């Protein structure tokens, strides 16, 4: 029997039982896919985490978990640590140890983080405006490419912050922000973020607000609402939930700027000497702030991932052995049920070797198809790892 004939008969036999064939291909493909995909995902995640951490020289924030602080600054995860006061950032900037970049990433719009920072952040991350322009005033924002694509947003549109607690009726109004620009894609968490000025995040936090002028008679109500130079507004005063050119001058801040909150501060030291001075400044355990080397924190996280990977690989290996054993049993039972078919082949002149080749060809076709599908899945997993990591972390 020729090879072409063996292949043809094997293909016809597999097509005759499509459900069994597809089930075997899927089982073997998943058995091959999961261990390799896990290895590829963790390896790619380590590369992505390490690259972003190495681009962030030093990080200053409230004392606590260094990994939580690092993930909040690098991936804008929800803040679990107490806030850092703005005066700490000002004191650090006055020491002139290097470039200081404030980060305030407490709020969100849906699932997208709202990041309050300065324009120096865009230089640090090599971010450029692809469409539109940068922020120019309060209430402006620049958004990542993936966010703009998924929400079909463009410059001139608006995006609204999400309230922290929908049941807090007395809380801060959600702020509607004007989109002035869209960043060029760079396959980092910045692609999913909304970047605003620090003062805009403080408006969202309720530390600043704008409202109708209290001199309007229809707002003041009766004369009893005023006492000398002091004006007492009634409940009809409307607080603005959007910054426009018309009401920009009506927004004002309350309290001391030094007490306003930040999440962290990125420090890019000027040289090795300033780096050493910065590291030495935060070694006192009494200091309420800490300094973190993001690359070291990510390395610790990677070690934890590697330990988890080994446990998962053992579990996947055991499951894979069991799945392959079941697939082998299905093949053997299938060949047992087809003994009459094999005897027919023998009667028409097929040798025992040809029959074994026929059976082997069926196994080979299924194994090759499963391997190809598994390899495609592994390739897609590796390509999607950066975006998937961002979604999992944030």
Image (cartoon, helix red, strand yellow):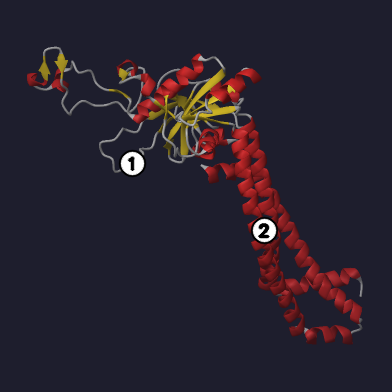
Q: Residue at x 40, y 25 (%)?
A: 200
Camera-side residue of 227 and 61: 61
> Which label was assigned to residue 165?
1
Q: Which mark is residue 313?
A: 2
Query: Which picture quadrant has residue 172?
Result: top left
Looking at the picture, how far across and down is residue 103, in whole percent?
A: 48, 27
Relative image position of residue 105 (x, y in whole percent) = 46, 32
Could you tell me which secondary element the residue under label 1 belongs to? Answer: loop
* CA gap, disc 2 and disc 1: 40 Å
Residue 39, position as x, y percentages in the image: 69, 51
Between label 2 and label 1, give the one nearer the viewer.
Answer: 2
Judged from this view, the residue extending furthest toward the top is 229
Please count the marks in the image: 2
Q: Quadrant of the N terminus?
A: bottom right
Name the residue rendered at 42%, 18% in the picture.
137
Q: Earlier in the sequence, mark 2 or mark 1?
A: 1
Which dot marks residue 374? none
Secondary structure at badge 2 equals helix
Residue at 38%, 37% in the rendered image: 162
């Amino acid at each position: 029997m020729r090879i072409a004939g063996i292949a043809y008969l094997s293909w016809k036999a597999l097509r005759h039982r499509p459900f069994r064939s597809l089930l075997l291909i899927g089982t073997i493909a998943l058995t091959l896919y999961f261990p390799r995909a896990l290895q590829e995902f963790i390896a790619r995640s380590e590369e992505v985490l390490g690259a972003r951490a190495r681009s962030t020289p030093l990080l200053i924030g409230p004392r606590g978990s260094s990994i939580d602080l690092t993930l909040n600054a690098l991936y804008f995860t929800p803040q679990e640590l107490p806030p850092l006061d703005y005066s700490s950032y000002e004191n650090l900037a006055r020491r002139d140890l290097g470039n200081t970049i404030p980060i305030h990433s407490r709020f969100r719009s849906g699932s997208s983080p709202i990041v309050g920072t300065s324009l120096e952040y865009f230089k640090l991350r090599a971010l450029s405006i692809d469409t539109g322009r940068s922020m120019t005033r309060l209430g402006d924002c620049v958004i990542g490419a993936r966010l703009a694509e998924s929400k079909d947003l463009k410059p001139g549109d608006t995006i609204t912050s999400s309230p922290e607690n929908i049941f807090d009726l007395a809380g801060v109004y959600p702020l509607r922000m004007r989109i002035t620009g869209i960043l060029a894609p760079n396959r980092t968490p910045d692609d999913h973020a909304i970047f605003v000025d620090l003062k805009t995040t403080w408006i969202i936090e309720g530390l600043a607000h704008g409202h109708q002028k209290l001199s309007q008679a229809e707002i003041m109500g009766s004369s009893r609402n005023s006492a000398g130079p002091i004006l007492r507004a009634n409940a009809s005063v409307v607080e603005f939930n959007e910054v426009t050119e018309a009401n920009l001058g009506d927004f004002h801040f309350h309290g001391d700027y030094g007490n306003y909150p930040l999440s962290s501060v990125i420090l890019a030291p000027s040289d090795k000497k300033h780096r050493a001075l910065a590291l030495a400044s935060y070694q006192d355990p009494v200091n309420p702030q800490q300094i973190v080397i993001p690359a070291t924190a990510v390395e610790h996280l990677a070690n934890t991932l590697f330990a988890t990977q080994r446990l998962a690989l053992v579990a996947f290996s055991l499951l894979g052995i069991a799945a392959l054993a079941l697939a082998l049993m299905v093949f053997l039972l299938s060949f047992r049920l087809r003994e009459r078919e094999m005897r027919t082949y023998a009667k028409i002149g097929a040798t025992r070797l040809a029959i074994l080749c026929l059976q082997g060809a069926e196994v080979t076709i299924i194994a090759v198809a499963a391997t190809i599908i598994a390899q495609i899945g592994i390739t897609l997993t590796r390509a999607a790892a950066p975006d998937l990591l961002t979604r999992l972390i944030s």
